[in-house]
Amino acid sequence: MFGNYVKIAFRNLIKHRIHSIINILGLSIGIAISILILILVQDELSYDKYNDQWKRIYRINRLAEIDGTHFNGALTPLALKEELIREIPEVEAATRLIKGSHKRVSFETTHLSAENFYYADESFFKIFSIPLLQGDPSTVLSDSLTIVLTESTARAYFREHDPMGKMIELDNGLSFRVTGICEDVPANSHFHFDYLASLKWIEKMYHKERWLVEITATYILAKQENSSQPIIEAYLPGIIEKNIIADLDDYFGKESMNFTDDDSFEFYLQPVSEIHLNSLEEGEFESGTDKVYIYVFTFIALLILIVACINFMNLSTAKSVSRAKEVALRKVMGASPRQLIFQFLSESVFFSFIALFLSLVVLELLLRPLNLYLDKNLDIFYLENWYLVPGFILGAFFIGILSGSYPAFYLSAFKVVNILKGRNFRGMRSTRLRGFLVLSQFTISIILFISSMIIYQQVRFFRNSNLGFNQQNLVIIQRAYAIQAQRDTFKEVLLKHPGIIAASVSTALPGSTIEQFPFYIDTLDVKHLIYFRPVMADYDFMRTMQMHLLEGDFYQSKEAECYGSLMINESAAREIGLENPIGMHLSGFGIMGEEMDYTIRGVVKDAHFESLHNEIKPLAITLLPEKSHAQFLAVRISGDRMTESLAYIEKVWKEFVKDEPFNYYFLNKDLDDLYNEEETTANIFAIFSFLAIFIAILGIFGMASHTAEQKTREIGIRKVMGASMPKITMMLSAQFTKWVIWANLIAFPVAYTGMKLWLGKFAYHINMEAWFFFLAAILALVIALATISFQAIRSACASPVEALQYE
């Protein structure tokens, strides 16, 4: 019996080829996209779970509220690690991790740029499960000036030779001995290093005992999975009171600090598996993903699958009338309704498995371009994940049952007498059901379309906003400390070219990470603690960046008195709280933790040194001492002499620096990259909206086909009575148009609310305009009418004689 059902299913598949292709194609695309989204979601949820003990690994984060300013960051003092191990029995191990600046690392004649240069403790490999291929995990980083290389980095330097014990040299003259080789850091990690040097060298440079300078991420391995977290967090306030508050009191005197009950310092634990989806404001090694997108994409995957199943159901039902005589003959021959239901459910499951097979083919075709676009390595590991194949089979079975349930019960309910008399059948008699199907499909499509338009406009706003400086035609050369000894001479030679307007060296630039440092201001014998983001730059920095002076004066030359002075931005001036901060004295710490005294020299207009995701933070620009290292060389060139200016810069660079590679980028391109996540999200939403519209077209085509088939006799009579083709088309389109309009009315507030919440995440964002919604409404109506009109015109062109014979 079952073999007969399969044979009939094949026969119907071949007989109604076009209908079957459309039907299976819609379902297969829906399944493929749903699986693809779930693979992407699974990858995002897998971050840092490669660690064998990921459930016991936590990062210590810092939360502070000072004078109404909120701070939430991932960096902590160097001294915190030893205090955690000494004071908290529930801490089994602890380690620290610091991301270094961009470097050149050399071995003999091989010189490579090192963007991912990190420092860590000897306990790093005890906590993180990154296997060592060579070296002892407990001792590879125990000595100062030792380093671990990843497998791919070691191969780039040493090819097939043994790297152990070899000395590699940094561009600052330091040499590190290779003591270990580890596997490359997994892609699903919240940090990625190529070089991992011993942190003991950093401890020698910095003032380790200073608790107010936060430069390292601190991780702990708890003794138990869940119960340890509240126990450990209970110890943290005591550590703050004992060290940070005590440090402040010792440094300034308890009576001089103006702390209020609203001010607070706090350490808290963050599970390592939550870091990627819950990135903090400051101190993250890499940008993460907003977990809201995970919920949204999962919901969209389910919606697309449901819409695909509904379409499968609609298209199957639309063709059901053509099989009425088959049902009648089977009933006459003794087939029971149960047997008929089983037959049509079997056909539906059969088509569902065909759709599953095609969806996996589509999935494999989509994965490669998606991986290239997202820079990921997504894949379906059929053999490694034993549950996938049974899950796909079970899923296809349930999709087949769900999609075929209505057509099966609809067909089995046909009455033999009515079939043999040739009467019309109205299985989907309910207008509400048809309306709900159109409503659901187009509501989803319109929401996705509006969302993608708004996200695109927000990205465009990000990239076209006035940042407070001129980002165009700025060439940035990294590792400017290569010309440290002769940087003034280098700049003079550059400026001889007519296409070069200005040049400046600095420790930071817009788009680079600038960690905040504490400063202390004396006002009326009370010390205020505030945080600024410090930038050290030469006296040409303001002119090169084309920033705007509001008060005071720029650094004009290397005057001795300039080295202890600050240029601050408007946000920093507001933070200080005085109308005229010029001449005010501040104290604080330098980059190495040393105590420093400063005088405010001028105020510049606020400029966006970070992305527009965040509000402008207080900024302090100090004059760069001659012996200090600067990471960046910014060169402003004329836009109409771009090529020759770049060639000249490279020529001069190679004359001054023999072995240093000439690596550069354009600042505006680097700033554009800050919004890649939003642009990727917009593209994904656009693809989803296109697919949702495509599936909706298939569904509305099926319903229009079904409706036209139901009204065959009515159409014939209307044509005999003189009805024109446009009138017949309007008759068939009217009911669908009504539901598309309702879909717009429902989608508008949903899309508006969702996008308002999304835009609320950004400090600076667009306003939602009415044309976003009107364009979506017009597009939905045009698509619906075009799809329905195709079927309506086809029915209107049919012969009235054949239409009347239908009854």
Image: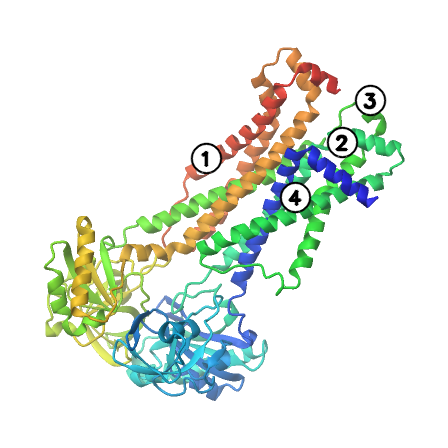
| Residue 705 appears left or right of 658 | right
Crowding around mark 1 (Cα neighbors within 10 Å: few <14, some 14 to 19, many 20+) is some
| Kind of residue at badge 2 | Arg
Whether pointer 4 and pointer 3 mark residues with C-beta atoms closer than 8 Å, the reply is no
Whether residue 33 is visible, yes or no, is: no
Q: What is the distance, in whole Å, between disc 1 and disc 4 at their CAs?
A: 29 Å
Task: Kindly report which numbered mark, 1 or 2, lies closer to the viewer in this rendering.
Answer: 2
Q: Which is more N-terminal, label 2 or label 3?
A: 2
Could you tell me residue 762's position as x and y percent? Answer: 40, 55
Q: Quadrant of the C terminus?
A: top right
| Kind of residue at badge 3 | Lys
Residue at point 18%, 73% (across, down): 484
Crowding around mark 2 (Cα neighbors within 10 Å: few <14, some 14 to 19, many 20+) is few
Q: Is residue 473 above or below residue 573?
A: above
Could you tell me residue 299's position as x and y percent? Answer: 57, 51
Which residue position holds label 2?
323
Task: Kindly report which numbered mark, 1 or 4, lies closer to the viewer in this rendering.
Answer: 4
Whether pointer 1 and pointer 2 mark residues with C-beta atoms closer than 8 Å, the reply is no
Residue at point 70%, 14% (across, down): 801
Q: What is the distance, in whole Å, between disc 1 and disc 2 at their CAs?
A: 42 Å
Query: Element at badge 2?
Result: helix
Image disc number at residue 309:
4
Residue at point 41%, 51% (across, down): 679
Q: Which is more N-terminal, label 4 or label 1?
A: 4
Q: What is the distance, in whole Å, between disc 3 and disc 2 at their CAs?
A: 15 Å
Query: Element at badge 1?
Result: helix
Task: Kindly report which numbered mark, 2 or 4, lies closer to the viewer in this rendering.
Answer: 2
Whether pointer 1 and pointer 4 mark residues with C-beta atoms closer than 8 Å, the reply is no
| Residue 325 appears left or right of 771 | right
| Kind of residue at badge 4 | Cys
Given residues 503 and 244, the one toward you in this image is 503
Which residue position holds label 3?
421
